[in-house]
Image (cartoon, rainbow, N blue to C red):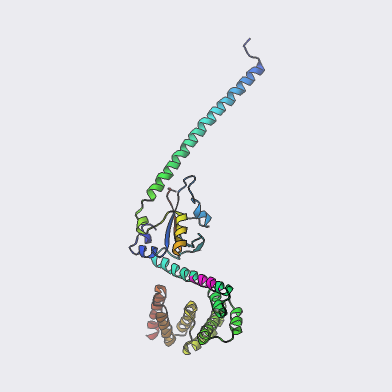
Amino acid sequence: MNGRSNSQSEVFSMRRAITTALLLGTVLLSTSFGAQDAEQERFKKSYEKALTAEFISHGNWITDYDLARERAKKEGKVIFVFFSRSYAP
Amino acid sequence: MERGPLSQPDFPAFSAKVIPFLHLTTRIKGKKHDGLLGEKGFRSFPTLAFMDAEGKIIGQPAERSIASFEQAFDVLSKHLELVAKHLALEKRIANGEKGLEFELFVAEYNLGKVTGEAVTRRIKAFKDLTPAQQKQADQILLDEEVIGLIKRAMEDEDAVRTVSARFVELLDANTLPSKRVALDFWAILAHTAAKDSNAALLERVIQGLRKGYPDREDVQNYAASLEEKLKELSK
């Protein structure tokens, strides 16, 4: 005769399954967050690199939307906006 | 784009007239205004546009060239000047200033707020216009007549000949529509001249285009193509 009854064994198995699932989920989540963090780092580096492009200083481009609107109001000028991206598609 | 018009030597001269704003979509979480492209109704990169100081999109250049940027800027600047003029007039009238009704009408007309029959009705209601104002009123009435005739010619090919005949009358009387309307006027005359092999009329159209639009490269190119046609007619 073993130390557990059938119903106790079922409960034990269920608890083990839940614990395993929780552990697995935690590992997956950590991996996922880690990947997201790495991706965000890449985006930040790409953005910093994009800001060094020669055409920006050549044309005196502002990269701050709030500042652009402030200057447009102050100087009575229209804003010429160039929409682009810094991340690779 | 970056290696094209935005890097050309004459770009800084254009960018000095505006506030050049580079918006980069970064996909960095929490970055302020990162979704601006979509908020402004655009979907693709690269996109160029003009905004007012509130951030409202007011226009876009037709092409990716400095010439196109300049052209769009000129049109927008004129429009913004008209808007400012109209606002200033409304303010003066609100402050009790008298005698500005005709000026206000002209400001509204130039903004496209008064069109069609309303233009004629409002002009006819003015009494005691000064000679300069009367001249301006007459020009507006002529422009409205020409706009109506152009519309007729565009909608009904059979009407082109009648419209063209009226345009020749105006040309003979040296009564020409203003620049904002005249291109279609000349185009309809050119079409009829070419169709009728009328070299004399075609020559007058070419002169009108060359003289009226010396700074418009597209119009000068059109005049050049008509000159080629004229050479064929003269053979």
Q: Position of residue B173 (x, y in %)?
A: 48, 90
Q: Is B123 on the left or on the right of B23, as rendered?
A: right
Question: Residue at horizontal 46%, vertical 84%?
Answer: B193
Q: Is B47 on the left or on the right of B92, as rendered?
A: left
Query: Which quadrant, please, contains the N terminus of chain B?
Result: bottom left
From what the image shows, is residue A79 above or below residue B121? above
Question: A19 or A59, which lies in front?
Answer: A59
Q: Is B83 on the left or on the right of B118, as rendered?
A: left
Q: Is residue A34 visible?
A: yes
Q: Position of residue A66 (x, y in %)?
A: 47, 55
Kindly report the secondary structure that dominates the magenta region of the rendered protein: helix
Q: Is residue B70 magenta?
A: no
Q: Is residue B229 visible?
A: no
- Residue farthest to the bottom? B173
Question: B82 or B14, which lies in front?
Answer: B82
- Residue farthest to the left? B9
Q: Is residue B88 magenta?
A: yes
Residues in magenta? B81-89
Q: Position of residue B65 (x, y in %)?
A: 40, 64
From what the image shows, is residue B40 above or below residue B211? above
Question: B44 or A40, which lies in front?
Answer: A40
Question: Residue at horizontal 65%, vertical 14%?
Answer: A5
Query: Which of the 4 quarters of the picture holds residue A61?
Result: bottom left
- Residue farthest to the top? A1
From what the image shows, is residue B33 above or below residue B9? above
Q: Is B218 on the left or on the right of B125, as rendered?
A: left
Query: Which quadrant, please, contains the C terminus of chain B?
Result: bottom left
